[in-house]
Amino acid sequence: MGERPRVDPFPENRREEDAGAVFVLQSKGQWWHAGFHLTTAIVGPTILALPFVFRGLGWGLGFFCLTVMGVVTFYSYYLMTKVLQHCEKAGRRHIRFRELAADVLGSGWMFYFVIFIQTAINTGIGIGAILLAAECLKIVYSNLVPNGSLKLYEFIAMVTLAMIVLSQLPTFHSLRHINLGSLLLSLGYTFLVVAACIYAGTSKNAPSREYSLEPSKLHKVFNAFTSISIIAAIFGNGILPEIQATLAPPTTGKMVKGLVMCYSVIFITFYSAAVSGYWVFGNKASSNILKSLLPDEGPSLAPTWVLGLAVIFVLLQLLAIGLVYSQVAYEIMEKNSADVKQGMFSRRNLIPRLILRTLYMIFCGFFAAMLPFFGDINAVVGAIGFIPLDFVLPMLLYNMTYKPPRTSLTYWINVSIMIIFTGTGIMGAFSSVRQLVVDANQFKLFSSEVVG
């Protein structure tokens, strides 16, 4: 009521000739498929950094920040689904984040801003997934062959080869069974890590632990903002419109059910990993709790088979995460290279898909080998990228679409979230850059050890 009819800048009839939309973002899924995709996009091995996050915040602030981020991101994603449904009912169904932002905000530069941020995030996650999966392989190899000669870059090549094969799955929807497996893997390694932490904490060799924060107020502030930006990146998504695009229309209500499924898994995994890991190691928790359980010196603090199984589960899930976040790149490639009038598996479309996706994965694998300190760079990308896409734009899009009165609680909640998280993003980026500078002396191109 009262909304002036607007011409869709991305009309459906043009999409019929858009191979990125017709092939990669094929709309066939049910709500539980969206739940699988969302869970893979959010619940990953980054949750093993949560004890480290608590190390920078302490018990009280750690619980508070984790809970607030969870509530705000659920609210943010819920608003995004409402905006997408509103546009769909108005005859302007959007299947890409960049198109949604450009339409609602009426700005051509917003289209390019979103695509730039998405590309930075998705490529960063692709590189990080290959690097971390290779590190997992190296951990397993080192335990089986203690004096083995294989280097990190050789494991990166193995993982890249596996990703090249898996990348040929043609549509986002075709990942639904892989992403169900990913959901089960996330529960599996979380339970194994929690069990390992309880075992380590109750054994006679339990590590001594302190929960005190840095004595310096300045370091305490920097650590707090770094921890908050890590939580933001852990809850980050950045591809919700593309995930919603995989649903068979009409999408009303389906995405909310998917979100509820995803956040049920988040509740189980995030809190249990954070509490158990911080309880055992306190302010000595490392950036990956598995490293604390498998110290470089001395015996492992839990049964080796338990930790080995957890590492294998993490390795397998990283392949799924790399695939999910590659879909935006594949959709852009297919949009510009494929001919929708010929079949998805026609020679005309199959050969360019094989070549382009292989080149993309080789690019990610090369940078993973060259920059094995990518964790620190990714923290900067997370602070600069995830916060605008997941904490600022959804609120702005909702206010522009539904136009709540400026006197309403909804309007001011949304504005407050935008202001608070813009400031948090700036401080988080500054803290992450500072950490990058601090770690710079450890960086070495094509190193055989992962830094950060």
Image (cartoon, rainbow, N blue to C red):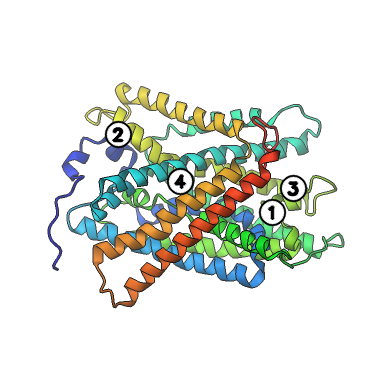
Residue 80 % position (x, y)? 34, 59
Cβ–Cβ under 8 Å for marks 2 and 4 = no
Q: Residue 305's mark?
A: 3
Q: Which of marks 1 and 3 is nearer the N terminus?
A: 1
Amino acid at dot 1: Ile
Residue 189 % position (x, y)? 63, 53
Q: Which of marks 4 and 1 is nearer the N terminus?
A: 4
Report how far apart the C-alphas of labels 4 and 1 lie in the structure: 28 Å
Mark whose residue sits in front, 3 or 2? 2
Q: Residue 289's mark?
A: 1
What residue is at 32 percent from the left and 51 percent from the top? 247
Amino acid at dot 4: His
Report if residue 181 is visible in the image.
no
Residue bearing mark 4:
177
Q: Residue 335's mark?
A: 2
Report how far apart the C-alphas of labels 2 and 4 lie in the structure: 25 Å
